[in-house]
Every structure is written in C-alpha cells, then in structure tokens.
Image: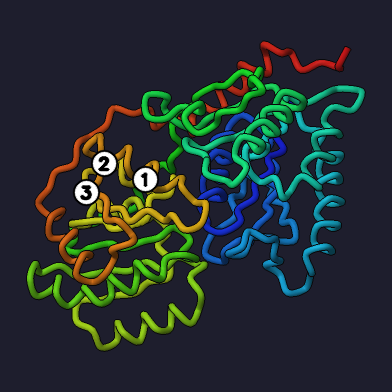
Amino acid sequence: MTRPRVLFHCQQTTGLGHLVRAMNLAEGLAHDFDVTLLNGGPWPAELAEPEAIDVVHLPPLGLDADYALVSRDERYGVEEALRLRVAMIQESFRRTAPDVLLIELFPFGRRKFETELIPLLEAAHSPGRRPFVACSLRDILVHSRRNQLGHDDRASQLANEYFDAVLVHADARFATLEETFRPTIPLRVPVHYTGFVRAPRSHDRAIEPQRRVLVSAGGGRVGAPLFRAAAEAAPHLLDEHGLRTVVVTGPFLPDPVVTELSRRASTARGLEVMRYLPDLGAEMAVSAVSVSQAGYNTVMDILGCTTPAVVVPYGEGREDEQPARAVKLERLGAVRVLDPSILSARTFTAAVRDAVNWTPLALPLDLDGRSRTPELLKSLCLARDVEPAP
C-alpha cells in the first residue's frame, strides 16, 4: 500500500533552530508518511541526514545583520541561487506529487522567499489532485517590525488564500498565535496547537552527573558575547564552586571566534570548548547549571530536565521572540533570565552562583508535538478527503 507523501519546506536564515525543529517533525512524520524535506539553509557537517527522509539541499541562503539575503555557498550569487531554488522546488513538487505540503513559518515570516514559495503554492492549487497545505509555526513570532500591521495583514491574506491549516507547535496555555499576530484582516484558516516539538532522549548510554556549567547558543552564529563571558568567568566558577565550564560553540560560530576560545581554553583553568554535542539535551540533564540563549529547541531541552537554567535571550535588531519566551518562562518559575545588555564575566558568575542551588518549577506543558503532529495531519487530511478540486 502506497504511503501518503509530505513535501516540507524549511528555511533557516541565521541559526540552526528552524532546521532542528523541522528535522524532529520530519522524523516523526516519517513513521506514517514518505517525507521529502526541502532544506534552504546551510546544513552543518555534524548533523547526520536521517535515512528515513529524502533531503533536497537547495542552494543555501541566509540573512545578514541588515536582513538582506546572502548566499551561504560561494559558488552562487543570490540571484542565481534564487533561480536554481525555484526550479528545484518545482521539480520536487512534480516528482513527489505530495498529499501534504508543509511550509515552515511562511507567510507569518520568510517573506523574502516569496519568489519561490508563491509559485510552489500556486502549483499546489493547480487543477487536479490538490495537496493539503499547512503552515508549521513555532510558539512565538517576531512582532516588532517597522510595519508590523502591514506584515500581519499580508500574512493573513496569504494564509486565507493558500493554506488549509496553521499548525502551532506549542501548548496554548503557554503561548497563543494571537499574542504575537494581530492583523486587521481576520485569519479564517483553522489554527491547531500540536504541543511543543522536542527530540526524543537518547538512551544509548548512561551519563554520570557532572559538576559543570554547560554553555550553549544553538547554532552559535550569534553566540560570541555569551561564550566570551563564560570563558572569562570559568576560573572563578572553578575556584568558588568547583564547577568546570563547558562551552558548546555550535557549528555556525565563526571560525576566528572558535580559535580564540580554544586558545583561551588551552591556558584557562576549568574551561573546555567543544564544537558540537550530538545530544545536548542529555548532556544538559546531567549538568549542574545550563546557561544558554532562549531559542525554541534549547528551551525544549530545558523543560525536559530538572537542571537549573539561566537564559540570556538573543534580542538584537527586530528579534524579540527569545526575550518574549524568556520572560514567560521566568514568570512561571522555569528559568532565571540574565539580561544580555548587562552580560559580563561578573554577571555570568553571579547568575550561575544564584542558580546552582535553585530548583526550577516543572511546568505541566504538552511536549508531545513530535508524535501529535502526524496524527493531526492524518485526521485533517481524512476530514478534507484530499480529492481533485471542484
């Protein structure tokens, strides 16, 4: 019997979070669907491609500090990459003939990729057997753009025109779409909350509890200030609390900063620098304290264990998603927040000292989005009975 097919478009522009969440969703979907993942950003060498998923690597694009498109592959300029991506996406759509088209974030974000996504959505609505079209959203959206109302209205218009459902990967008791999406054009597309999506814990080996501070910043591209503060604080934490400091840079931290931190670790007491850990959540669970940014996937690791956590949310430019998530978590007693505007070795040390003997509150949130999303999509497709458009 032929299994239903999913074509899943994912575009990460700065960090690793969107890809990690998409991979978790794709692996969950692969139990019931044949999944093709369109990967629009750089794929780190440390991340293995799951055998159960067909990954199509588009010429990778990202955004610079001014939110302009940049190529992440020196073989292509931006315009050439965009042309190639459109052709590859259309070919993938024809080849897979998907029963479900899943698009991550768009139209609520990723508007710079309309040149490839609108043609994909038009293809999905062409005469014949039409796929079920759904948007995959995280818990909190960026909501401080210069023309936020115009952005939200355009998103609502596009969602109403092209999408059958919006899947919010969150627990509605923690965050709702309406909190960070306020268009004047009503959103008519059904919104479904799947629960948060997190990776399953690895049970390959038992890890002994560690007297250490585990410091991370997702993919690492914007983690340098946090890592430098941690490196400077490391000898003090070793002397005062007997805690080693382990910095996990992530694959996207610029090489010169990795070299700088590694040189410091060669002489500083109590400091270790690593590029990548395959199961950061498991390592976090056996650490004395976690210090990190407040991205979606890192927060899932925090909520999945009892380790005291300090978060230093990234909030440069228009990026207000992490600060909003951090404030919510702190109010619920799940984390401590260190304001990035006052980040230094001294404030880092003080935050760890305050957290090391603190017990965070366990939150009764739905963390089963990885398994619930496939069930939800199957039921939605069945209800719609994916048939030729009238």
Q: Give the number of marks.
A: 3
The location of residue 161, given as percent across then percent down, is 77, 25
Q: Nearer the viewer, residue 206 or 96?
A: 96
- Give the crowd class for mark 1: few <14, some 14-19, many >=20 residues within 10 Å: many
Q: Nearer the viewer, residue 215 or 2?
A: 215
The location of residue 244, given as percent across then percent down, is 19, 70
Q: Relative to residue 58, is residue 42 drawn left or right?
A: left
Mark 3–mark 1 distance (CA, rounded to whole Å) = 12 Å
In the rendered image, which residue does mark 2 sit on? 330
What amino acid is at disc 3? Thr
Q: Nearer the viewer, residue 195 or 146?
A: 146
Q: Can residue 231 be seen? A: yes
Q: How is the image coloured?
A: rainbow
Residue visible at 58% across and 50% down?
A: 50
- Give the crowd class for mark 3: few <14, some 14-19, many >=20 residues within 10 Å: many
The location of residue 318, given as percent across then percent down, is 52, 52
Q: Quadrant of residue 289?
A: bottom left
The location of residue 172, given as percent across then percent down, is 42, 24
Which mark sits nearer the N-terminus, 2 or 3? 3
Please, is residue 137 above or below residue 219 in the view?
A: above
Mark 1–mark 2 distance (CA, rounded to whole Å) = 12 Å
Q: Quadrant of residue 198?
A: top left
Which mark sits nearer the N-terminus, 1 or 2? 1
Question: On the rendered image, what quadrant is the C terminus found in?
Answer: top right
Q: Relative to residue 301, is residue 80 drawn left or right?
A: right
Q: Nearer the viewer, residue 162 or 198?
A: 162
Q: Disc 1 vs disc 2: which is toward the camera?
A: 2
Mark 2–mark 3 distance (CA, rounded to whole Å) = 14 Å
In the rendered image, which residue does mark 3 sit on? 307
What amino acid is at disc 1? Val
In the rendered image, which residue does mark 1 sit on? 299
